[in-house]
Amino acid sequence: MTRLAEEKLAVRTANELERRIMQNRWQPGAVIGSEAQLLEEFGVSRAVLREAMLLLEQRQIAVRRRGNGGGVRVRRPDPSGLTRAVSLLLEFDGVAPEQIMETRILLEQRCVQEAVRRADLEDLGGLTQLAREGLKLKGEAARRQMGDFHLRLAKISGNPVWALFTQVLIQVAVDLIGRSGAIPSDRDIRKQFEELVHAAQTLIDLIAALEDNDDVQNVYANFEVSDDALAKFAA
């Protein structure tokens, strides 16, 4: 078998294993099989199987473990791989950090709206606490806390797709800003946290109003039109 034929067979083998993982909804840590079992099942050479395993590892959906209790196991893909690829692509195409932030703001406004419908006071209390803790931090720790705040808000929306893209956009912005050298000052970060504390409290007040008012749609409509404090979330 030629090298090219081996590569194509490895890709087909990897694709089949990937299909099984997703179709069967196997959880991280689940054993796909030992090397011996997979060699027998697929009828390929050890070189082809190892190439297929390398592809699955590069796709971050499986990992090989040696020794007792080893074999090929399912793993949860890490968003960091996606983040780095997106960051490099956008920077290569000349996208500015401001454009990334504009996109995140649009997404976050939708997250805020959905958080009002779904969140409870405990969720929003956690957001407020993150913002208050951020007031005490400086430098990298403060910037990381800011990212954690926005990611927590996205998760409260209840939409895992929004949360994933928020995470990616935050990290891409961090990468681009870091490479450009335009890092926000501690003073600017603190001002943003002060605004976030106020915005989070605004949402808490709104949730309480929704719970106490039978005309939920009216309260929500007024909130959407008039509450300028919501813009502070995406600052």
Image: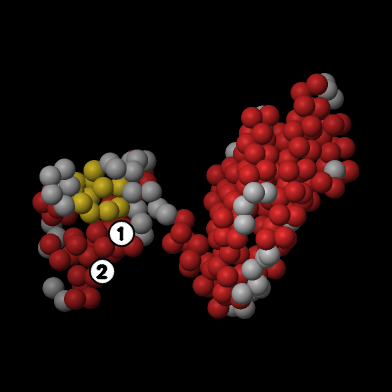
- Residue 58 drawn above or below residue 226: below
Left or right: 53 as drawn, with respect to 151: left
Q: Residue at x 56, y 55 (%)?
A: 141
Query: What is the CA distance from the residue labelled 1 to the residue labelled 2?
Result: 17 Å
Cβ atoms under marks 1 and 2 closer than 8 Å:
no
Q: Residues within 10 Å of mark 1 (few under 14, many from 20)?
A: some
Screen quadrant of the C terminus: bottom right
Tally the numbered discs: 2
- Residue 1 drawn above or below residue 202: below
In terms of depth relative to the viewer, which is nearer, 76 or 204? 204
Mark sitting earlier along the chain (1/2): 2
| Residue placed under numbered mark 1 in the picture | 57
Q: Is residue 153 visible?
A: no
Q: Residue at x 24, y 46 (%)?
A: 32
Q: Is residue 2 visible?
A: yes
- The amino acid marked with disc number 1 is Glu
Left or right: 235 as drawn, with respect to 15: right
In terms of depth relative to the viewer, which is nearer, 1 or 83? 83
Residue 79 screen position, x and y as percent: 46, 56
Q: Residue at x 33, y 62 (%)?
A: 58
Numbered circle sitting on residue 8: 2
- Residue 25 drawn above or below residue 165: above
In terms of depth relative to the viewer, which is nearer, 197 or 42? 197
Q: Secondary structure at mark 2?
A: helix
Residue 217 screen position, x and y as percent: 82, 31
Q: Quadrant of residue 221?
A: top right
Residue 44 screen position, x and y as percent: 14, 60
Left or right: 173 as drawn, with respect to 2: right
Q: Secondary structure at mark 1?
A: helix
Residue 171 screen position, x and y as percent: 55, 60
- The amino acid marked with disc number 2 is Lys
